[in-house]
Amino acid sequence: MQLSLDVGLGLDACVEIGRKLAPLRDEGVLIAGSGNIVHNLALMNGQAPAGRGFDWAERFRADIHRAIAGGATETVVHYDQFGQDGLLSVNSEEHFRPLLYVLGARSVDDGVRFENDHIELGSLSMTTVVFEPAAA
């Protein structure tokens, strides 16, 4: 099943939709969100070192990683609290929203791992966040 993004919804509503989808995990359904933690096409730089972001992008990515790892979903939802770092990194919310659906579907016991975790062209990340059920 594919969800469309309703940009008319608040970011908290995206998390709530994820919470409503969470029981599907018990039925073996994989819940995936395709988006970006850092996504600023206007500031991409082809001369940026491979795998390295602008300072603001690296700081924001690290802050969001800490929030996700610590289960602080509200911190992720309110990314604007990171000031200019957050506003530059999430200058297009439709690319950030898929993460919120997935965070809502997360179980409190899930472990987390980050894959493909780097920034390209200074301002674009394609990090994959994987939530894994705790070992029985």
Image (cartoon, helix red, strand yellow):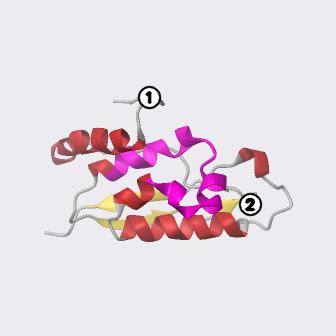
* Range covered by the magenta-colored residues: 78-103
Query: What mark, if any, has residue 122 been given in the picture?
Result: 2
Is 14 on the left or on the right of 89, as rendered? left
Residue nearer the viewer, 67 or 113? 67
Residue 117 in view (yes/no):
no
Task: Please state which of residues 81 and 119 is positioned toward the viewer in this rendering.
Answer: 81
- First along the sequence among labels 2 and 1: 1
Tell me what residue is drawn at x 39 percent, y 30 percent.
Answer: 3
The Cα–Cα distance between marks 2 and 1, rounded to whole angstroms, is 28 Å
Residue type marked 1: Asp
Q: Residue furthest left?
A: 136
Horizontal relation, residue 129 to residue 16: left or right: right
Q: Residue at x 35, y 64 (%)?
A: 72
Q: Residue at x 75, y 57 (%)?
A: 121
Which label lies toward us, 2 or 1?
1
Hey, what amino acid is under mark 2?
A: Gly
Q: Is residue 63 above or below residue 6?
A: below
